[in-house]
Amino acid sequence: MITANCFAVDPWILREAPLNMDLLPQSESVFALSNGHVGWRGNLDEGEPHGLPGSYLNGVHEVHPLPYAEGAYGNPESGQTAINVTNGKVIRLLVDDEPFDLRYGRLRSHERVLDLRAGLLRRTCEWTSPAGCSVRVRSTRMVSFTQRSIAAVAYEVEAVDSTVRVVVQSELIANEQLPTPKGDPRAAVALQSPLDAEEAAASGTRLRLIHCTHNSGLRVAAAADHTVDGPAMTSTSSESTADVARLTVTSELAPGERLRIEKTVGYGWSGVRSLPAVRDQVEAALAAAANTGWQGLIDEQREYLDDFWARSDVEVQGDEELQQAVRFALFHVLQAGARAEQRAIPSKGLTGTGYDGHSFWDTETFVLPLLTYTSPNAVVEALNWRHSTLPQARDRARQLGLRGAAFPWRTIDGSECSAYWPAGTAAFHVNADIADAVIRYVSATGDAEFERGCGLELLVETARLWMSLGHHDSGGTFHIDGVTGPDEYSAIADDNTYTNLMAGRNLRWGAEIAERNPHEATALGVDHEETAAWREAAAEMHLPYDDELKVHQQHAGFTRHQPWDFDSTRVDQYPLLLHFPYFDIYRKQVVKQADLVLAMYTCGESFDAAHKARNFAYYEPCTVRDSSLSACCQAVIAAEVGHMQLAYDYAVEAAMMDLNDLENNTRDGLHIASLAGTWMALVCGFGGMRHDGDVMSFMPRLPERLSRLVFRIRIWGRCVRVEIDARSATYTLLDGPSMTIRHHGEVLTLTTGSATRRPVPDGRRLRAPEQPPGRYPGRPGQQPDEQP
């Protein structure tokens, strides 16, 4: 676990000093740079030592057979794993023939700084070789938001106290040796040497490698160019082999003299284009970057981020660590989706190959809500990617004997690649999650073109799945049986409440948008009879309820299951799935991640206040949070029902998921959904923001630890600033025509440039429900301190 003092607390940067070798794999994820298309893990410039080398292109993967002890109809046949593509960030240094390697010699100082406003990773270190020669090394690394295919490094070496001969080797490396993964099934499958060489070239200061994957047939190209600035006798040479292209720079530096190399790397890939076409693509990317220049790239990056922070920043007063964490979270969510452009947003972004680089329902339910109200262009690109995979989803539905489309539980290219069908195939709620993202985006932006095109078709095909998956009983009630909801510790259950409610929303909005776009709906074969059937199913959707306990059931029969034996469960036996058989877990009242509690957030209109409070109190003691997706939505509902200290502690847990490595797997990549959930916990929890169609409402209330919260959202072509303190909330319409909102039920009209202030009513102080032993949320080692 990363301790709290590993990174200095600062509102706009993440600073690590000194270097902690034991935490190298985790820091590589934390310091990763990406734009959603190209991703570079935060490996040291010299490449070694490392935890996991990582250079990624979104969508580039290898396929491999999925082994089964027994064959069965409908099992996915192939797995997909994101691969480590050509590494362009390596710059090796030799000082008087001694390799610059931090495991040898004396490391006199070392600092890395991730600048969240500039989008740069800076490194400064001073090192004395085993032979006694000292050098100072500085590097600045970036992955460009404005030039999608470009990443770059500025590398500088300075002699400190004596004249030294230095050799710098700037490389492109394919098929790097990867560490053997450990037994944790959440870790990625390491595919050794997945790339077949097609072309290698080195000329002057320019390098290029082109490869193709063995099985998936994806062609990957990387090219690099360099600007070298050093003393007069500095010389260069270049060479290439099948998997390595290298520029070697040799110089002699007197004390205080510097050698500087600016390296620009262009990436490209395709599953259909020819080798010459992909070669030309990366060469063109380099030409454009050269025209911009290093300083131009830096300036463009800052301008891009200035615009992002102006519309997206969340200001927190009262907890400096939380302020840093929420900006860290916003930055990494932006990196995951900014330039994905009709590709998936993986659950780890492009920070590591955890979960094999797959995308799940996390994207639509946790990541896209944040992006909808801050960077809607990224949302439409993500939904267009889902739309592009409709052929695979329709094929999967037909294979399962269903109509419409069955979107995959986990995937890279749009086809299902989960070998465990109870948690994979049966988790049909992913269809409703995608539909919900469509509804939210259309409602927030009014994008009519998307609505009548991709949006409508996604809603129609997902609605058709529910009609063929569910059924009306003899009394007319609609049931969806044998499915797995968000909680992966309950599988193949009847009438999962979250699934049923979200499916009902899918059906209602599918009917509404089809009727709003009759010409396009008719082209998809939708008629009035079909939409009427959708509305009827939604109206008659069954919601399991325990009349004795007066709580909603997570699924039919859940509250009669035997409770989990928490008294006999040791703290070191979490996550349960690594220490107990699923068969035992499935039969007990134990919840991996918020399920019914999540339903109370996404479909809050279906529950009154009293039921929300009772439901939350019932499910808290059996929710173990063996998933990083849980804390953020528990924070939202805890705040809504009045447990402000508990809500604050859940918000902190979501925010610190990776900065403190709370799940002990940050080495495999960051938890992008939990990072996005930090925004959810603050804006939807303490800000009380809810958006339902044409209604935007707020029920703000702060926990005692926080004295002020400020955030901005974009909706309906407007930007609204919300400022909350202990006694009041102030709403300011920054741009756009006047609009109405609701503040604790009161209707307010906002006009551009004017601030509207309203008091925040006192909330109830309730005794918080208990959590499973050893599972109280918050910072490591924290204990509950809320008083009745």
Image (cartoon, helix red, strand yellow):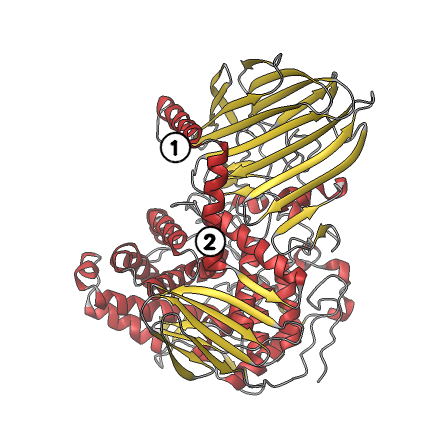
Location of the C terminus (image quadrant)? bottom right
| Rendered residue at 45%/74% (across/down) | 731
Residue type highlighted by circle 1: Gly
Q: Which of 420 and 10 is in front in this view?
A: 10
- Quadrant of the rendered structure where residue 466 is? bottom left
x then y, percent, for residue 430? 44, 59
> Vertical placement of 626 versus 28: above or below?
below
x then y, percent, for residue 371? 45, 57
- Residue 577 numbered mark, or none: none
- Residue 271 numbered mark, or none: 1
Q: Which of 19 and 423 is in front in this view?
A: 19
Q: Which of 178 and 259 is in front in this view?
A: 259
Within 10 Å of disc 2 (Cα), the crowding (few <14, some 14-19, many 20+) is some
Label 2: which secondary element: helix
Residue type highlighted by circle 2: Phe
x then y, percent, for residue 287? 40, 26
- Quadrant of the rendered structure where residue 141 is? top right
Label 1: which secondary element: loop
Look at mark 2 in the image and give the residue it sits on: 308
| Rendered residue at 52%/65% (across/down) | 680
Instruction: Decide if residue 68 is in sight here.
Output: no
> Vertical placement of 560 versus 175: above or below?
below
